[in-house]
Image (cartoon, rainbow, N blue to C red):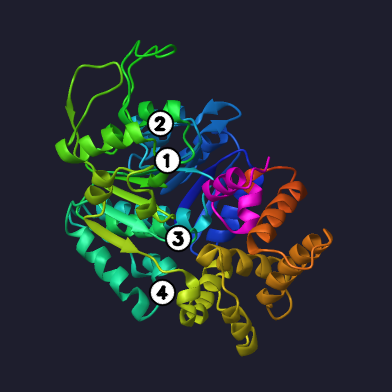
Amino acid sequence: MPDSTKRTLLVIDDDQLFCDSVQEYFRNYLDVLVANNGGDGIKACSQYRVDVVLLDQKLPDAEGYTLCESILKYNEQTKIIFITAYPSFDGAVKAIRSGAYDYLSKPFELEELKLTIDNALKTLALERVAQVEDYRTSKESEETVLIGGEKLSEVRNLIRVAAETDAPVLITGETGTGKNIVAKAVHYSSKRKGAFISINCSTLPENLIEAELFGYERGAFTGAMTSRKGIFEMAEGGTLFLDEIGEMPLHLQTRLLNVLEDGKIKRLGGETIRPVYVRIIAATNTNIEESLGKHFRPDLYYRLSVIRIHLPPLRERKEDIPELCKYLLRRIAGIEIPLEKEEIRRLMEYDWPGNIRELKNILERAYLIQRGRPLRPSELIGIKVAQAFSQIGSSGNDIITLEEMEKVHIRNTLNKLSGNLTKTATALGISLSTLKRKLKEYNLK
């Protein structure tokens, strides 16, 4: 039976490994209930006061969105966070219409889920005391990325400035620096009451992205049996986060520029011009200036970068590593786990190409593997690098380039994980979109 002193999270998902991970991650401050099908999920809602539901799109006995009405019937204040897997957004659209609070696209990290749940609980607390006032992300949520000294003081200041306006924001920085969390910090620190909706421009097929963004009318193309809202209309009153904006096709860049200028959209196959009130935040991990006039419209770039927030890589702020380790380990384990000074020194000697995401993954693996003895996360870095050099050295070359090393390491990791892209990206400490870009760049299959 749930502890009445804690908030209750219900996970409705048939992936038991995912459920176990969520239960372990949140066990110290939430009561986590698990249901592996829709029927058991509804039963749990009828028996307990559930604050937040994490609802999978595909369940053995139902489509996730069909359960929203039943969940809210037992408690209309329950916040439903819908989980949708690329490339299907139909269920997400239906879930939002049915009363879902927010949705996340798989794959995502537990830290991102934590931020979303924190915001849902905060909204719930405000509603329960009938308050209609602005709310901001907690300092703890911001610290996920924004722990640090002077190098990040400008980032924190720009978040505050951006939150006070509706101007477009462009966030730049390498993979793993936390651009998505900065985007959420801007949204939840603002006065906007709508949803925060995020899409990755590099993962949507070109023939789908226009329909997903702007919606379509019945008969607009083969298979369009009904009219459907696009992401812009779903984000009405809120924020649309366009990750990997540099991967957006040129013809859609033109349409996006028109929306930014006019605040209006037109669905595919439609004639009606619809006003939309949406705040645009874009992000890229590439040097987009080099693409201006080639793969990216200069006028769109200047329109998006009214407020520019750049996140420096971890190698340029290694002085933050001790505090980051302390913070991340506390979030991973739920308790303080100190690292020895020599271990901190070794971690600070590493350049962390995967940035904070890589640091978090290394710490999490160390916590799981090295339980019962002092943590030595640097040992895992050494093993991975040594294995990569060993495998490359077998080719007979005495000297190799970093590019060759990366190519071989990606190929070997792919082979080891049977070609599973999601697992490979996680193991390498990079995002799925970055992995796909590197596979294309290195002509790997």
Q: Nearer the viewer, mark 1 or mark 3?
A: 1
Q: Which residue is denoted by mark 4 in the rendering?
A: 147
Which badge, 2 or 1, is on the more N-terminal residue? 1
Question: Can residue 212 be seen?
Answer: yes
Q: Residue at x 66, y 74 (%)?
A: 377
Residue 277 in the image: state x and y as whole percent: 19, 39
Q: Residue at x 58, y 46 (%)?
A: 441
Question: Which amino acid lies under the numbered mark 3 shown in the image of this protein?
Answer: Lys
Q: Secondary structure beneath disc 4? A: loop
Spatial CA distance of label 1 from label 4 is 28 Å
Q: Secondary structure beneath disc 1? A: loop
Spatial CA distance of label 1 from label 3 is 38 Å
Residue 6: mark: 3
Residue 328 in the image: state x and y as whole percent: 52, 70
Q: Which residues are magenta?
A: 423-445
Q: Which residue is denoted by mark 2 in the rendering?
A: 209
Which badge, 3 or 2, is on the more N-terminal residue? 3
Question: Which amino acid lies under the numbered mark 2 shown in the image of this protein?
Answer: Ile
